[in-house]
Amino acid sequence: MLPTALTPLLPSTPVDRFLQRALTGQSEARGAAVWDAGLSATEVMAALQTHRLGPLLCARLPSDAWDSLPDELQAWLKSRGRAQALLDVQQMLALRELLPLAQAQGRPVLLLKGIPMSYRHYPEPHHRVKTDVDVLVRPSDAAGLMALLESLGYTRSLGVTGQLINRQATLARGDVAFDVHWSLSNTAVFAHVLNFDAMWHDRTDLPALGAGAYAPSDEDLFLHACFHLALHIGYEFALVWLYDIHLLASLWTPDAAERILQRARRLRILRVCLACLQLSRVWFGTPYPDDVGAALARSTGPELSAQILACHLSRWKRLQLELLALSWRERLRLLYEMGFPSEAYLRQRYADTTTWLPWLHIRRWLGRPGVVSPVEPGGATADIDGKAHKNEY
Protein backbone atom coordinates (compact mmCIF):
# COMPACT_ATOMS: atom_id res chain seq x y z
CA MET A 1 0.00 0.00 0.00
CA LEU A 2 1.06 3.57 -0.61
CA PRO A 3 2.19 5.31 2.59
CA THR A 4 -0.40 7.83 3.77
CA ALA A 5 2.25 10.54 3.75
CA LEU A 6 2.46 10.23 -0.06
CA THR A 7 -1.25 10.66 -0.85
CA PRO A 8 -0.71 14.31 -1.90
CA LEU A 9 1.26 12.94 -4.88
CA LEU A 10 -1.72 11.06 -6.33
CA PRO A 11 -3.37 12.55 -9.44
CA SER A 12 -6.17 14.77 -8.16
CA THR A 13 -6.47 17.93 -10.29
CA PRO A 14 -7.78 18.37 -13.85
CA VAL A 15 -4.20 19.04 -14.99
CA ASP A 16 -3.03 15.82 -13.32
CA ARG A 17 -5.73 13.86 -15.09
CA PHE A 18 -4.83 15.46 -18.42
CA LEU A 19 -1.20 14.38 -17.99
CA GLN A 20 -2.31 10.91 -16.97
CA ARG A 21 -4.59 10.53 -20.01
CA ALA A 22 -1.98 11.83 -22.41
CA LEU A 23 0.92 9.72 -21.10
CA THR A 24 -0.95 6.43 -20.74
CA GLY A 25 -3.11 6.55 -23.86
CA GLN A 26 -6.30 6.28 -21.78
CA SER A 27 -8.09 8.68 -24.06
CA GLU A 28 -7.40 6.59 -27.14
CA ALA A 29 -8.65 3.44 -25.43
CA ARG A 30 -11.83 5.07 -24.17
CA GLY A 31 -12.53 7.23 -27.19
CA ALA A 32 -12.35 10.34 -25.04
CA ALA A 33 -10.75 13.65 -25.90
CA VAL A 34 -7.32 14.30 -24.39
CA TRP A 35 -7.85 18.05 -24.06
CA ASP A 36 -10.64 19.35 -21.87
CA ALA A 37 -11.98 22.79 -22.76
CA GLY A 38 -11.99 23.67 -19.07
CA LEU A 39 -8.20 23.28 -18.77
CA SER A 40 -5.89 26.25 -18.58
CA ALA A 41 -3.01 26.14 -21.06
CA THR A 42 -0.93 28.22 -18.64
CA GLU A 43 -1.46 25.74 -15.81
CA VAL A 44 -0.67 22.79 -18.08
CA MET A 45 2.56 24.42 -19.24
CA ALA A 46 3.55 25.10 -15.63
CA ALA A 47 2.90 21.45 -14.72
CA LEU A 48 4.86 20.17 -17.71
CA GLN A 49 7.75 22.43 -16.76
CA THR A 50 7.68 21.20 -13.16
CA HIS A 51 7.46 17.54 -14.15
CA ARG A 52 9.91 17.80 -17.12
CA LEU A 53 7.43 16.13 -19.45
CA GLY A 54 7.03 18.46 -22.42
CA PRO A 55 8.95 16.47 -25.08
CA LEU A 56 7.51 13.18 -23.85
CA LEU A 57 3.99 14.54 -24.11
CA CYS A 58 4.67 15.50 -27.72
CA ALA A 59 5.79 11.95 -28.45
CA ARG A 60 2.86 10.28 -26.73
CA LEU A 61 0.02 12.36 -28.22
CA PRO A 62 -1.64 11.04 -31.40
CA SER A 63 -2.02 13.58 -34.20
CA ASP A 64 -5.75 14.12 -33.70
CA ALA A 65 -5.18 14.83 -29.99
CA TRP A 66 -2.35 17.22 -30.86
CA ASP A 67 -4.67 19.21 -33.09
CA SER A 68 -7.07 19.67 -30.17
CA LEU A 69 -4.46 21.48 -28.04
CA PRO A 70 -4.56 25.29 -27.79
CA ASP A 71 -2.17 27.04 -30.18
CA GLU A 72 -0.28 28.55 -27.24
CA LEU A 73 0.41 25.12 -25.79
CA GLN A 74 1.40 23.67 -29.16
CA ALA A 75 3.95 26.45 -29.69
CA TRP A 76 5.35 25.97 -26.18
CA LEU A 77 5.71 22.21 -26.61
CA LYS A 78 7.47 22.59 -29.95
CA SER A 79 9.87 25.11 -28.44
CA ARG A 80 10.70 22.83 -25.51
CA GLY A 81 11.19 19.85 -27.78
CA ARG A 82 13.60 21.74 -30.06
CA ALA A 83 15.56 23.06 -27.07
CA GLN A 84 15.94 19.58 -25.57
CA ALA A 85 16.95 18.07 -28.92
CA LEU A 86 19.66 20.73 -29.29
CA LEU A 87 20.90 20.19 -25.74
CA ASP A 88 20.99 16.44 -26.35
CA VAL A 89 23.33 16.94 -29.29
CA GLN A 90 25.59 19.15 -27.19
CA GLN A 91 25.62 16.60 -24.36
CA MET A 92 26.36 13.76 -26.78
CA LEU A 93 29.33 15.64 -28.28
CA ALA A 94 30.60 16.47 -24.79
CA LEU A 95 30.46 12.81 -23.77
CA ARG A 96 32.18 11.71 -26.97
CA GLU A 97 34.95 14.16 -26.07
CA LEU A 98 35.26 13.28 -22.38
CA LEU A 99 34.75 9.53 -22.11
CA PRO A 100 37.61 8.31 -24.36
CA LEU A 101 39.99 10.59 -22.44
CA ALA A 102 38.77 9.24 -19.10
CA GLN A 103 39.10 5.72 -20.44
CA ALA A 104 42.68 6.42 -21.58
CA GLN A 105 43.49 7.60 -18.05
CA GLY A 106 42.09 4.39 -16.60
CA ARG A 107 39.12 6.12 -14.91
CA PRO A 108 35.93 4.07 -15.31
CA VAL A 109 32.80 6.21 -15.63
CA LEU A 110 29.16 5.18 -15.33
CA LEU A 111 26.42 7.39 -16.78
CA LEU A 112 23.43 7.82 -14.49
CA LYS A 113 19.75 8.71 -14.56
CA GLY A 114 18.57 10.73 -17.56
CA ILE A 115 21.26 9.87 -20.11
CA PRO A 116 21.06 6.04 -19.96
CA MET A 117 17.28 6.13 -19.56
CA SER A 118 16.84 8.34 -22.61
CA TYR A 119 19.12 6.30 -24.87
CA ARG A 120 17.84 2.90 -23.78
CA HIS A 121 14.17 3.27 -22.90
CA TYR A 122 12.66 6.28 -24.69
CA PRO A 123 11.76 6.32 -28.40
CA GLU A 124 14.15 9.24 -28.93
CA PRO A 125 16.74 10.57 -26.45
CA HIS A 126 15.30 14.09 -26.44
CA HIS A 127 11.92 12.77 -25.23
CA ARG A 128 13.46 12.50 -21.76
CA VAL A 129 14.31 15.92 -20.32
CA LYS A 130 17.78 16.16 -18.79
CA THR A 131 19.46 19.46 -18.07
CA ASP A 132 22.79 17.99 -17.02
CA VAL A 133 24.87 14.85 -17.40
CA ASP A 134 25.23 12.71 -14.28
CA VAL A 135 28.36 10.57 -14.06
CA LEU A 136 29.50 8.22 -11.29
CA VAL A 137 33.14 7.43 -10.53
CA ARG A 138 35.05 5.82 -7.70
CA PRO A 139 35.91 8.29 -4.91
CA SER A 140 39.58 7.88 -5.79
CA ASP A 141 38.88 8.99 -9.38
CA ALA A 142 36.70 12.03 -8.64
CA ALA A 143 39.50 14.60 -8.39
CA GLY A 144 41.14 13.28 -11.55
CA LEU A 145 37.94 13.37 -13.58
CA MET A 146 37.19 16.91 -12.42
CA ALA A 147 40.72 17.96 -13.34
CA LEU A 148 40.16 16.44 -16.78
CA LEU A 149 36.92 18.40 -17.19
CA GLU A 150 38.65 21.59 -16.12
CA SER A 151 41.37 20.96 -18.71
CA LEU A 152 38.57 20.81 -21.31
CA GLY A 153 37.28 24.22 -20.27
CA TYR A 154 34.65 23.31 -17.69
CA THR A 155 34.30 25.50 -14.60
CA ARG A 156 33.44 24.07 -11.21
CA SER A 157 30.43 25.63 -9.45
CA LEU A 158 30.83 27.06 -5.99
CA GLY A 159 29.76 24.56 -3.35
CA VAL A 160 30.48 23.21 0.10
CA THR A 161 32.95 20.33 -0.01
CA GLY A 162 33.95 17.64 2.48
CA GLN A 163 34.03 13.91 3.05
CA LEU A 164 30.36 13.62 4.03
CA ILE A 165 28.46 16.83 3.32
CA ASN A 166 28.68 16.72 -0.45
CA ARG A 167 29.42 13.71 -2.59
CA GLN A 168 29.13 15.42 -5.96
CA ALA A 169 30.34 18.48 -7.83
CA THR A 170 29.01 20.37 -10.86
CA LEU A 171 31.21 21.58 -13.71
CA ALA A 172 29.82 23.51 -16.67
CA ARG A 173 30.95 24.74 -20.08
CA GLY A 174 28.38 26.73 -21.99
CA ASP A 175 25.05 24.91 -21.90
CA VAL A 176 26.55 21.55 -20.91
CA ALA A 177 26.91 20.71 -17.22
CA PHE A 178 28.39 17.57 -15.69
CA ASP A 179 27.41 16.40 -12.23
CA VAL A 180 30.33 14.30 -11.03
CA HIS A 181 29.20 11.88 -8.32
CA TRP A 182 31.51 9.71 -6.23
CA SER A 183 28.53 8.23 -4.39
CA LEU A 184 25.04 7.41 -5.64
CA SER A 185 23.47 9.71 -3.08
CA ASN A 186 24.40 12.77 -1.03
CA THR A 187 22.69 11.29 1.99
CA ALA A 188 24.19 8.50 4.07
CA VAL A 189 20.79 6.77 4.17
CA PHE A 190 21.35 5.70 0.54
CA ALA A 191 25.03 6.48 -0.12
CA HIS A 192 26.20 2.89 0.22
CA VAL A 193 23.17 0.98 -1.06
CA LEU A 194 24.89 0.19 -4.36
CA ASN A 195 28.59 -0.47 -4.85
CA PHE A 196 30.44 1.06 -7.81
CA ASP A 197 32.55 -2.01 -8.55
CA ALA A 198 29.52 -4.32 -8.56
CA MET A 199 27.65 -1.88 -10.81
CA TRP A 200 30.66 -1.66 -13.12
CA HIS A 201 30.79 -5.45 -13.35
CA ASP A 202 27.14 -5.56 -14.49
CA ARG A 203 27.34 -2.48 -16.72
CA THR A 204 25.84 -2.14 -20.17
CA ASP A 205 27.27 -0.13 -23.03
CA LEU A 206 25.70 2.86 -24.79
CA PRO A 207 27.17 2.65 -28.31
CA ALA A 208 25.39 5.80 -29.51
CA LEU A 209 27.64 7.81 -27.18
CA GLY A 210 30.91 6.34 -28.38
CA ALA A 211 33.81 4.54 -26.74
CA GLY A 212 33.79 4.36 -22.97
CA ALA A 213 30.04 5.06 -22.63
CA TYR A 214 28.62 2.71 -20.03
CA ALA A 215 25.51 2.66 -17.86
CA PRO A 216 24.39 0.57 -14.89
CA SER A 217 22.23 -2.46 -15.59
CA ASP A 218 18.49 -1.90 -15.77
CA GLU A 219 18.15 -3.50 -12.35
CA ASP A 220 20.63 -1.04 -10.82
CA LEU A 221 18.99 1.84 -12.68
CA PHE A 222 15.65 0.86 -11.16
CA LEU A 223 16.96 0.65 -7.59
CA HIS A 224 18.75 3.97 -7.97
CA ALA A 225 15.68 5.60 -9.52
CA CYS A 226 13.57 4.53 -6.54
CA PHE A 227 15.76 5.89 -3.79
CA HIS A 228 16.57 9.00 -5.84
CA LEU A 229 12.84 9.72 -6.14
CA ALA A 230 12.26 8.94 -2.46
CA LEU A 231 15.03 11.32 -1.44
CA HIS A 232 13.50 14.18 -3.45
CA ILE A 233 9.86 13.62 -2.51
CA GLY A 234 10.26 15.68 0.67
CA TYR A 235 10.89 18.91 -1.23
CA GLU A 236 10.37 18.24 -4.93
CA PHE A 237 8.39 15.79 -7.06
CA ALA A 238 8.88 15.42 -10.80
CA LEU A 239 6.85 12.86 -12.72
CA VAL A 240 9.72 12.25 -15.11
CA TRP A 241 11.48 10.28 -12.37
CA LEU A 242 8.36 8.22 -11.76
CA TYR A 243 7.96 7.59 -15.49
CA ASP A 244 11.52 6.21 -15.56
CA ILE A 245 10.49 3.73 -12.86
CA HIS A 246 7.38 2.84 -14.85
CA LEU A 247 9.40 2.09 -17.99
CA LEU A 248 11.90 -0.07 -16.14
CA ALA A 249 9.34 -2.04 -14.12
CA SER A 250 7.20 -2.60 -17.21
CA LEU A 251 10.02 -4.74 -18.64
CA TRP A 252 9.98 -7.24 -15.76
CA THR A 253 8.97 -10.84 -16.00
CA PRO A 254 7.40 -12.28 -12.81
CA ASP A 255 10.70 -13.98 -11.94
CA ALA A 256 12.66 -10.77 -12.49
CA ALA A 257 10.22 -8.81 -10.33
CA GLU A 258 10.65 -11.23 -7.43
CA ARG A 259 14.45 -11.25 -7.79
CA ILE A 260 14.70 -7.45 -7.85
CA LEU A 261 12.34 -6.95 -4.91
CA GLN A 262 14.21 -9.62 -2.94
CA ARG A 263 17.39 -7.70 -3.63
CA ALA A 264 15.73 -4.46 -2.51
CA ARG A 265 14.83 -6.20 0.73
CA ARG A 266 18.45 -7.25 1.31
CA LEU A 267 19.55 -3.67 0.62
CA ARG A 268 16.93 -2.43 3.11
CA ILE A 269 15.09 -0.28 0.59
CA LEU A 270 12.15 -2.61 -0.09
CA ARG A 271 9.48 -0.26 1.27
CA VAL A 272 10.92 2.61 -0.76
CA CYS A 273 10.76 0.52 -3.94
CA LEU A 274 7.24 -0.73 -3.22
CA ALA A 275 6.01 2.83 -2.57
CA CYS A 276 7.50 3.99 -5.88
CA LEU A 277 5.92 1.06 -7.71
CA GLN A 278 2.52 1.72 -6.17
CA LEU A 279 2.71 5.40 -7.05
CA SER A 280 3.77 4.49 -10.58
CA ARG A 281 0.87 2.06 -10.90
CA VAL A 282 -1.64 4.73 -9.88
CA TRP A 283 -0.23 7.26 -12.35
CA PHE A 284 0.73 5.06 -15.30
CA GLY A 285 -0.74 1.59 -14.72
CA THR A 286 2.64 -0.03 -14.08
CA PRO A 287 2.29 -3.82 -13.88
CA TYR A 288 4.02 -5.63 -11.04
CA PRO A 289 3.06 -8.67 -8.92
CA ASP A 290 1.10 -7.58 -5.85
CA ASP A 291 1.47 -10.94 -4.17
CA VAL A 292 5.29 -10.83 -4.21
CA GLY A 293 5.47 -7.27 -2.92
CA ALA A 294 2.86 -7.80 -0.21
CA ALA A 295 4.44 -11.02 1.03
CA LEU A 296 7.89 -9.46 1.20
CA ALA A 297 6.56 -6.38 2.99
CA ARG A 298 4.86 -8.52 5.65
CA SER A 299 8.08 -10.38 6.37
CA THR A 300 10.33 -7.30 6.36
CA GLY A 301 11.16 -5.38 9.52
CA PRO A 302 11.46 -1.59 9.87
CA GLU A 303 13.76 0.16 7.39
CA LEU A 304 15.35 3.52 8.17
CA SER A 305 15.12 4.46 4.49
CA ALA A 306 11.30 4.25 4.59
CA GLN A 307 11.19 7.28 6.88
CA ILE A 308 12.24 9.39 3.87
CA LEU A 309 8.83 8.73 2.31
CA ALA A 310 7.02 11.92 3.29
CA CYS A 311 5.92 14.89 1.21
CA HIS A 312 6.70 17.48 3.86
CA LEU A 313 9.86 16.26 5.55
CA SER A 314 11.55 19.11 7.38
CA ARG A 315 15.24 19.88 6.97
CA TRP A 316 15.77 18.93 10.60
CA LYS A 317 14.04 15.56 10.19
CA ARG A 318 16.21 14.89 7.16
CA LEU A 319 19.27 15.78 9.20
CA GLN A 320 18.11 13.45 11.97
CA LEU A 321 17.79 10.55 9.52
CA GLU A 322 21.20 11.38 8.12
CA LEU A 323 22.79 11.26 11.54
CA LEU A 324 21.09 7.94 12.36
CA ALA A 325 22.72 6.41 9.27
CA LEU A 326 26.21 7.47 10.40
CA SER A 327 28.61 6.32 13.10
CA TRP A 328 29.33 8.66 16.00
CA ARG A 329 32.64 9.65 14.46
CA GLU A 330 30.95 10.37 11.12
CA ARG A 331 28.23 12.40 12.82
CA LEU A 332 30.80 14.71 14.38
CA ARG A 333 32.58 14.97 11.05
CA LEU A 334 29.37 15.86 9.21
CA LEU A 335 28.34 18.53 11.73
CA TYR A 336 31.81 20.06 11.54
CA GLU A 337 31.70 20.15 7.73
CA MET A 338 28.24 21.75 7.83
CA GLY A 339 29.32 24.42 10.27
CA PHE A 340 32.83 25.13 9.00
CA PRO A 341 33.23 24.91 5.22
CA SER A 342 36.62 25.52 3.66
CA GLU A 343 38.26 28.92 3.54
CA ALA A 344 38.32 28.73 -0.27
CA TYR A 345 34.54 28.29 -0.35
CA LEU A 346 33.85 31.21 1.98
CA ARG A 347 36.23 33.61 0.27
CA GLN A 348 34.86 32.74 -3.15
CA ARG A 349 31.28 33.01 -1.95
CA TYR A 350 31.75 36.45 -0.43
CA ALA A 351 34.36 37.59 -2.99
CA ASP A 352 36.53 38.56 -0.03
CA THR A 353 40.22 37.71 0.31
CA THR A 354 41.11 39.92 3.26
CA THR A 355 38.39 39.72 5.94
CA TRP A 356 39.17 37.77 9.09
CA LEU A 357 37.99 34.19 8.37
CA PRO A 358 35.88 33.74 11.57
CA TRP A 359 33.83 36.78 10.56
CA LEU A 360 32.97 35.13 7.23
CA HIS A 361 31.79 32.05 9.15
CA ILE A 362 29.60 34.28 11.31
CA ARG A 363 28.12 35.97 8.21
CA ARG A 364 27.21 32.58 6.83
CA TRP A 365 25.70 31.35 10.11
CA LEU A 366 23.56 34.49 10.16
CA GLY A 367 22.28 33.66 6.69
CA ARG A 368 23.88 36.64 4.98
CA PRO A 369 23.81 36.18 1.19
CA GLY A 370 27.10 36.05 -0.64
CA VAL A 371 28.23 37.90 -3.73
CA VAL A 372 28.32 34.54 -5.52
CA SER A 373 25.32 32.24 -5.09
CA PRO A 374 26.45 28.85 -3.82
CA VAL A 375 25.41 25.51 -5.23
CA GLU A 376 24.37 23.67 -2.10
CA PRO A 377 24.48 19.89 -1.75
CA GLY A 378 21.60 17.99 -3.32
CA GLY A 379 20.99 15.54 -0.50
CA ALA A 380 19.70 15.58 3.05
CA THR A 381 22.68 17.41 4.50
CA ALA A 382 22.13 20.73 2.81
CA ASP A 383 24.29 23.60 3.97
CA ILE A 384 22.98 25.56 6.96
CA ASP A 385 22.27 28.52 4.70
CA GLY A 386 18.91 26.91 4.00
CA LYS A 387 19.16 27.34 0.23
CA ALA A 388 17.01 25.24 -2.03
CA HIS A 389 18.42 21.88 -3.00
CA LYS A 390 19.94 21.62 -6.45
CA ASN A 391 17.64 20.00 -8.97
CA GLU A 392 18.74 16.65 -10.36
CA TYR A 393 17.40 15.29 -13.62
Image: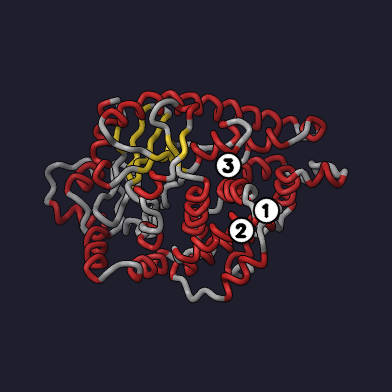
The residue lying at 46 percent from left, 45 percent from top is 392
**Depth check, front residue: 89 or 36:** 89
- Of pointers 2 and 1, the one earlier in the residue sequence: 2
Marks 1 and 3, how far apart at CA:
19 Å
Looking at the image, residue 27 lies above or below residue 255: above
- Residues packed near mark 3 inside 10 Å, few (<14), some (14 to 19) or many (20 plus): many
Between the C-alphas of marks 2 and 1, the distance is 7 Å
Vertical order, 364 against 144 (above or below):
below
Coloring basis for residues: secondary structure
Residue 387: percent from left, percent from top:
38, 53
Q: Could you tell which of marks 3 and 2 lies nearer the N-terminus? A: 3
Residue 269 percent coordinates (x, y): 48, 64
Q: Which amino acid, mark 3?
A: Arg
Q: Is residue 250 above or below residue 337?
A: above
Tag 1–tag 3 contact (CB < 8 Å): no
Q: Nearer the viewer, mark 3 or mark 2?
A: 2
CB atoms of marks 2 and 1 within 8 Å: yes
CA neighbours of label 1 inside 10 A, class few (<14), some (14 to 19), many (20+): many
| Numbered circle sitting on residue 336 | none
Q: Amino acid at mark 1?
A: Thr
User: Measuring 48% from the left and 75% from the top, which residue is drawn there?
Assistant: 302
Residue matched to label 1? 286
Q: Nearer the viewer, mark 1 or mark 3?
A: 1
Secondary element at image label 3: loop
Q: Which residue is farthest right?
A: 31
Q: Which mark is residue 52?
A: 3
Q: CA distance from mark 3 to mark 2?
A: 20 Å
N-term-proximal mark, 1 vs 3: 3
Which residue position holds label 2? 277
